[in-house]
Image: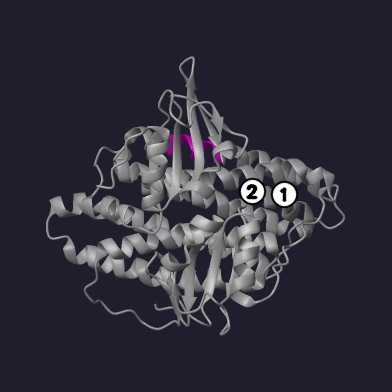
Amino acid sequence: MDPSGGEVEYEPVSVKEVLAEMKDTAELLIDLSFSAVLNGSDDVAREVLDLEARMDVLQMQARMSLLMAARSPEDAEQLAPVLGVVGAAEKISDAAGDIAKVVLEDIGLPEAMRAALPEAVETLVRTEVTDTSDLADRTLGDLNVETETGVRVIAIRRGDDWLTNPDRDTDLRAEDTLLLRGPEEGIADLYRRATGEEYDPPDPPEPGIQDLERAVDSIVLMKNISELAVDLAYGSVLFDSKEVAEEVVELEAEVDALQSRFEAWTLRAAARVEDPVSLRGLVHLANATEVISDAAVEISEGVLRGLGTHPVVEQAVKESDEVIVRLTVAPDSEFDRVTLGDRAVKTETGMGVIAVRRSADGERDWVIQPGPETELRAGDVFIAKGTRSGAERLAELTGSEYSAE
């Protein structure tokens, strides 16, 4: 089907381009769905459902093209993992849609959940460009928004079309809907320039149900780990790394364990709250988050089974909106023994460090969603997402090698 519910007919498409758009859309959907919950925003939740419909079209196009390409058993063996990547992206899309419906259908979510999410979700804001905005009819490169404010325009909706990979040559137009992600101060400045109005951030409520705190903590951690698992899964494909793919499997197992703990704490809390039905949304959120972690394993399945990365998938990941890099801090580099906050990594490079892995006494330990206080040390391996130019700058600062090839 198409987004309006019509039929999709086969037409030749670039599988590489479709896969790149599916990857960008899947990652955007995770951001948007949790932001809809955080802000209690029906508007953002509806954007999620629109993108979910777009993903349905993309996955159908990809499947038809891959079936047309399989002409022998050898082709089928090579393309099977690609179908796995397609199916996994669709599962992420469906899970994000389920999260959005928690908001749209007022299924019920305790205030404790919304109070906990601001620390787990980077500020993401939806805004429209007015006719009088100084952003209209200028390119992102000309505006230099990311370098000056640390804010990324992660997607643009123009009428019924989505631009999920805006770059420096993308122009902004009046009536464009922008999805902005970054520090709140930069968001406020860009929102004001786009609309002429002051940005009024949501005021998260204080946790009011103490019995739910452990359940809420579990689901927030599930969300963080699932996002990391998806990033590492695409990273395993890009680097054709079985080691990174195995980390994805370990993270998925951790999400399963957290879900068991979440269920136990939620059942205990249900006996103590005035209206147990108000916890339904929390259960939906946990189930959808667990699906995302399962999908991450499916993305890396081909690498795990030694089939390698099909060139079309590897190229799609390389050419998608956000590049994923895996860098090592070199001894005596500018990042050795300094915190991410000290170096203002996000502002200086536009790259977000999403995880740090360090080894001690033969044991590997992940720091998930590192913050400004996280210190990097020589030998630390870290995963970062952002623009290609930002990745090159970050590699230079850490003393690592980075190749765009």
Q: How many marks?
A: 2
Residue at (29, 64) in percent of width and height? 17
Residue 55 in picture, x, y percent from top left: 42, 68
Q: Quadrant of the N terminus?
A: bottom left
Residue 196 found in image quarter: bottom right
Q: How is the image coloured?
A: one colour
Q: Closest to the observer: 396 or 164?
A: 396
Q: Is residue 188 left or right of residue 238?
A: right
Magenta region: 247-256
Q: Is residue 319 above or below residue 259?
A: below
Q: Is residue 42 left or right of residue 203?
A: left
Any part of residue 298 in sight: no
Residue under label 1, please give it. Answer: 116
User: Overall secondary structure of the magenta stretch?
Assistant: helix
| Mark 2, other Cα within 10 Å: few <14 / some 14–19 / many ≥20 | some
Q: Closest to the observer: 299 or 176?
A: 176
Q: Is residue 369 left or right of residue 402?
A: right
Asked whether 100 falls inside the magenta stretch, the response is no
Disc 2 on helix, strand or loop?
A: loop
Residue at (32, 36) in percent of width and height? 401
Q: Which mark is residue 120?
A: 2
Residue type indicated by callout 1: Ala
Residue at (69, 52) in percent of width and height? 118
Q: Is residue 390 above or below residue 187?
A: above
